[in-house]
Image (spheres, coloured by chain):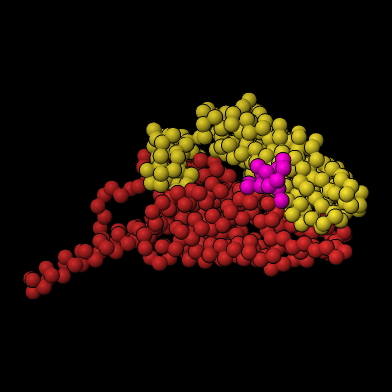
């Protein structure tokens, strides 16, 4: 089992060309893409995006995500409040979907990326195959958290029924969208090849 | 398709256990005989490739049409030889762009309650965020659900169309292919659709919600977008492009040689 790095080569991620290690940081001679044996400062960048995501996640849960005005009476809803209202009205399935997308998935993502980074930085943690699987899942599933932002957008566009009822988006929608984007960037910043280097040097 | 990863990449081709690989893969060194030139032009694999996700070196097997090779260690797709890949990519990209146009143009969802009615198009959703504290996210949402899927299909069509009609890959096709991959995680049409479903169920108890033609166009768009994602594999697209170029060159070489050969024979006769 030899990796390209051990063989003194860098694989271009765009066109698949193998270039000598000396061209690290330069451009691929075939397609002009940036060549990186391992993404520089991958762990640091990933951790920084993750921290930003956490920071945005706090106001996303404290501020109202939307404001429902019914017959002149306004009511603010937070994310968890919305889930609670849904569950209270008996739509358990819907409450479960929203809870999964806007609470469970982001939380799981913070924990998993945090654990991966911790393991890589301090040389402990999961075995590479498990690490790879976790990273794959996080990259795939993280995008689905955007669901709540889309729901708010659709409801705010649709529910403008004159004096009867109207819905306006709250500041938490923006914060939550940012949090999702930041955690997606965090998962992307983590170079998957580092997950396999474990123990060897990962510059 | 060859499913089991190990046999496709490891079996006899090996994941390069001991033998040190050459420094460069573009082995166009020795002048090739006619037959060999054609033979090489016809073999799909044979060179080295690293797994995009774990960096393990493999020798790419000479895949048959429809086969794919998975990394022997982590299972990531390393090479895929799709049948008529440019034709299919062009078809699906055009379908995507037409469907996206229809989805944006036609009414998307209608809602009515006690005499009041409202009809929205897709882009009304991001516009609803454009005022107040969520303004900065409105453009992102618009990009996620409409602009990015459209742009990616445009990039695919831009590269695939000349290949389908037998010309050289267009200028800046490398940039187009990179843009496609870069935007991949940010295309969120399918998530938006789930959002529509959640909203419709949420409102269902309080108002009548009906679906417009824009909704159906968008629903039809999801499988075609997924198909584009499924058959597009950047290094393999590059491989097909190189293969095309190699074949054209080999054919030209052959034609030149015959062209030189014939008059000489005539002269000697």
Judge whether residue B130 is colored magenta.
yes
What segment carries the magenta color? B128-140
Q: Position of residue B229 (x, y in %)?
A: 57, 56
Residue at position x 80%, y 63% in the image:
B117
Judge whether residue A72 is colored magenta.
no
Secondary structure mostly seen in magenta is: helix
Q: Position of residue A39 (x, y in %)?
A: 52, 34
Residue at position x 20%, y 67% in the image:
B258
Residue at position x 20%, y 64% in the image:
B257
Q: Position of residue B63 (x, y in %)?
A: 47, 58
Q: Is residue A121 visible?
A: yes
Between residue A161 and residue B229, name the one nearer to us: A161
Residue at position x 86%, y 56% in the image:
A164
Chain A, colour shown = yellow
In the rendered view, does A77 fall on the left or right side of B36? right
Chain B, colour shown = red
Q: How many marks?
A: 0
Between residue A103 and residue B19, name the one nearer to us: A103
Between residue B243 and residue B224, name the one nearer to us: B224
Q: Quadrant of residue B109?
A: bottom right
Q: Specify the farthest residue to the left.
A: B268
- Quadrant placement of the C terminus of chain B: bottom left
In the rendered view, does B56 fall on the left or right side of B29? right
- Quadrant placement of the N terminus of chain B: bottom right
In the rendered view, does A138 fall on the left or right side of A62? left
Above or below A88: residue B159: below
């Amino acid at each position: 089992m030899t990796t390209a790095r051990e063989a003194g080569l860098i694989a271009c991620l765009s066109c698949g060309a193998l270039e000598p290690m000396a061209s690290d940081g330069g451009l691929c001679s075939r397609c002009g893409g940036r060549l990186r044996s391992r993404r520089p400062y991958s762990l640091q960048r990933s951790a920084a995006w993750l921290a930003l995501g956490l920071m945005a996640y706090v106001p996303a849960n404290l501020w109202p995500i939307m404001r429902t005005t019914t017959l002149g009476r306004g009511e603010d809803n937070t994310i968890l409040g919305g889930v609670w209202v849904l569950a209270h009205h008996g739509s358990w399935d819907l409450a479960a979907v929203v809870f999964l997308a806007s609470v469970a998935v982001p939380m799981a993502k913070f924990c998993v990326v945090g654990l991966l980074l911790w393991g890589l930085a301090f040389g402990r943690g999961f075995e590479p195959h498990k690490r790879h699987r976790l990273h794959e899942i996080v990259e795939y599933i993280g995008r689905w958290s955007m669901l709540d932002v889309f729901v708010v957008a659709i409801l705010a566009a649709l529910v403008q029924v004159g004096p009867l009822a109207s819905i306006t988006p709250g500041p938490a929608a923006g914060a939550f969208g940012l949090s999702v984007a930041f955690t997606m960037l965090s998962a992307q910043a983590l170079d998957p090849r580092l997950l396999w280097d474990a123990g060897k040097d990962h510059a | 398709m060859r499913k089991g990863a190990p046999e496709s990449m490891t079996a006899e081709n090996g994941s390069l256990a001991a033998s040190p690989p050459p420094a460069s893969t573009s082995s166009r060194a020795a002048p090739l005989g006619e037959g060999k030139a054609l033979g090489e032009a016809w073999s799909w694999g044979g060179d080295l490739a690293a797994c995009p996700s774990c960096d393990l070196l493999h020798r790419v097997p000479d895949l048959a049409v429809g086969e794919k090779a998975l990394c022997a260690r982590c299972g990531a797709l390393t090479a895929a030889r799709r049948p008529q890949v440019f034709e299919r990519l062009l078809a699906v990209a055009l379908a995507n762009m037409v469907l996206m146009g229809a989805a944006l143009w036609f009414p998307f969802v209608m809602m009515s309650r006690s005499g009041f009615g409202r009809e929205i198009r897709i882009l009304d959703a991001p516009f609803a965020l454009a005022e107040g504290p969520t303004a900065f996210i409105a453009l992102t949402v618009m990009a996620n659900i409409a602009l990015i899927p459209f742009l990616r299909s445009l990039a695919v069509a831009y590269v695939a169309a000349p290949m389908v009609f037998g010309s050289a890959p267009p200028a800046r096709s490398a940039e187009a292919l990179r843009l496609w991959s870069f935007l991949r995680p940010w295309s969120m049409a399918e998530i938006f659709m789930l959002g529509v479903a959640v909203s419709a169920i949420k409102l269902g108890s309080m108002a009548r919600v009906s679906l417009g033609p824009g909704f159906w166009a968008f629903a039809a768009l999801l499988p075609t977008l997924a198909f584009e994602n499924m058959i597009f594999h950047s290094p393999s697209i590059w491989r097909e492009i190189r293969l095309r170029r190699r074949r054209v060159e080999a054919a030209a070489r052959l034609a030149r040689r015959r062209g030189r050969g014939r008059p000489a024979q005539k002269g000697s006769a």
